[in-house]
Image (tube, helix red, strand yellow):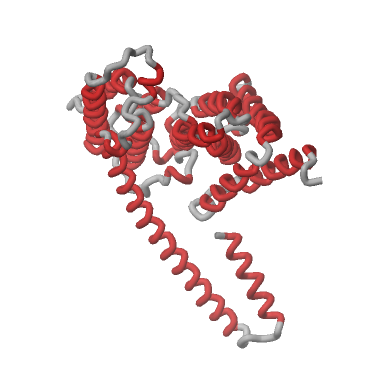
């Protein structure tokens, strides 16, 4: 019974449907649970890769059909079928599946490609189509979410996905090129957002956040190829565009007048140039021809990526973000504890108003109240 293919397929389908249903609401309180569900469910697709491939192809095809429908029927309702948390989590889930089971190191150890590897192409194409469906500033957070999913695939499977153009489009938009308006809004949490409220548009707090995301994701993309013998050629067109953007943004009359964003992009340009020079210097010492595939793949193989100029920069940036995230998480926990204490105090006051502890049923009522509060959180 356990080895029956029909049962395995039914289990995978039920798991995926349950995952999608549970990912409808995403907040700072639920994001960790949703990610745990995705990581756990992704492991099931490796138990029988052949059945995993057929079920995975079916579900990715459904996502592609929804995307095609949104492209052909340009209406607000059709866009809603794609631009929602369930769709984003579904694409992110498939990126986790192929990343877990098509990892280059795992395939090298087994001596053969995973049966799930053919899922990479359709998953990437659907994700790229979704992130460009509505190229407005309001949906930049969704674009960043999907780019992170694609970066996961790049890292695990050594698949090159051209992500720099999608990020430069954001940087070159009117949202980032014009001077921002001052605002007292709270900084947008891009980890739990796929859409920015209209009140954020053209504000400094939003421009700062978007610029920070673009600089981070560009550095995370290029660091994947920091040791590649072709890094200088890969980075050259993007460097030219970024330099042009910094020059235009820094103009007194027509620039965005946002020193924070401009400095972040200018710093990234410096690190990309430094890494290009580093690779070029290493290339002068090779003794193999460009058509020597083994030599090209073995270039800088013994050098850790953290030792590259760009790698060292990315490590420092990651550590800074981790510290910031830690402080935010501590603040969130302190706020939750404060709310919990306030509720308990309010419950005690209500109990006193009704004349003390009352009957035995009060214990059950308190348990039900606790469950209701948990649901609210």
Residue drawn where x is 26% and y is 35% of the image: 264
| Residue 202 seen in the current view | no
Tell whether 181 sits left or right of 78: left
Q: How many marks?
A: 0
Q: Residue furthest right?
A: 1
Residue drawn where x is 32% and y is 36% of the image: 305
Q: Residue furthest left?
A: 252
Tell whether 22 sits left or right of 345: right
**Vertical position of residue 161 compared to residue 259: above or below:** above
- What percent of the width, then of the height, locates residue 205? 33, 42
- What percent of the width, then of the height, locates residue 342? 48, 72
- What percent of the width, then of the height, locates residue 34? 56, 49
| Residue 165 seen in the current view | yes
Q: Nearer the viewer, residue 240 or 118?
A: 118
Which quadrant of the structure image shows residue 117?
Answer: top right
Tell whether 113 sits left or right of 105: right
**Vertical position of residue 218 compared to residue 183: above or below:** above
Which quadrant of the structure image shows residue 292?
Answer: top left
Residue drawn where x is 60% and y is 33% of the image: 80
Q: Nearer the viewer, residue 73 or 319?
A: 319
Which quadrant of the structure image shows residue 301?
Answer: top left
Q: Give the quadrant of the C terminus.
A: bottom right
Tell whether 251 sits left or right of 63: left
- What percent of the width, then of the height, locates residue 35? 54, 47
Q: Nearer the viewer, residue 261 or 197?
A: 261
């Amino acid at each position: 019974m356990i080895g029956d293919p029909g049962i395995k397929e039914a289990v995978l389908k039920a798991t995926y449907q349950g995952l999608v249903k549970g990912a409808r609401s995403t907040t700072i309180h639920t994001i960790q649970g949703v990610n745990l569900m995705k990581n756990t469910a992704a492991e099931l697709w490796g138990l029988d890769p052949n059945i995993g491939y057929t079920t995975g192809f079916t579900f990715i095809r459904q996502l592609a059909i929804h995307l095609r429908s949104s492209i052909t029927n340009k209406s607000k309702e059709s866009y809603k079928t794609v631009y929602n948390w369930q769709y984003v989590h579904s694409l992110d889930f498939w990126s986790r599946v192929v990343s877990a089971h098509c990892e280059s190191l795992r395939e090298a150890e087994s001596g053969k490609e995973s049966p799930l590897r053919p899922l990479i192409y359709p998953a990437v194409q659907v994700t790229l189509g979704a992130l460009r469906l509505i190229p407005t500033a309001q949906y930049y957070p969704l674009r960043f979410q999907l780019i992170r999913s694609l970066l996961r695939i790049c890292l695990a499977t050594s698949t090159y996905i051209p992500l720099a153009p999608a990020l430069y489009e954001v940087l070159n938009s009117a949202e980032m090129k014009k001077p921002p308006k001052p605002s007292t809004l709270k900084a947008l949490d891009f980890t739990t957002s796929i859409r920015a409220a209209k009140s954020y548009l053209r504000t400094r707090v939003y421009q700062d956040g978007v610029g920070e995301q673009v600089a981070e994701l560009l550095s995370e993309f290029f660091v994947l190829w920091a040791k590649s013998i072709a890094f200088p050629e890969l980075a050259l067109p993007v460097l030219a565009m970024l330099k042009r953007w910094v020059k235009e943004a820094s103009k007194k009359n027509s620039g965005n007048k946002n020193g924070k964003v401009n400095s972040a992009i200018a710093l990234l340009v410096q690190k990309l140039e430094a890494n290009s020079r580093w690779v070029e210097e290493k290339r002068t010492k090779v003794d193999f021809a460009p058509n020597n595939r083994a030599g090209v793949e073995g270039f800088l193989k013994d050098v850790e990526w953290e030792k590259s100029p760009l790698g060292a920069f990315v490590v420092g940036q990651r550590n800074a973000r981790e510290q910031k995230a830690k402080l935010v998480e501590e603040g969130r926990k302190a706020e939750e504890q404060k709310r919990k204490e306030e509720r308990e105090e309010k419950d005690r006051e209500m109990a006193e108003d009704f004349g003390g502890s009352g009957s035995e049923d009060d214990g059950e009522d308190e348990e039900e109240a606790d469950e209701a509060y948990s649901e609210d959180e």
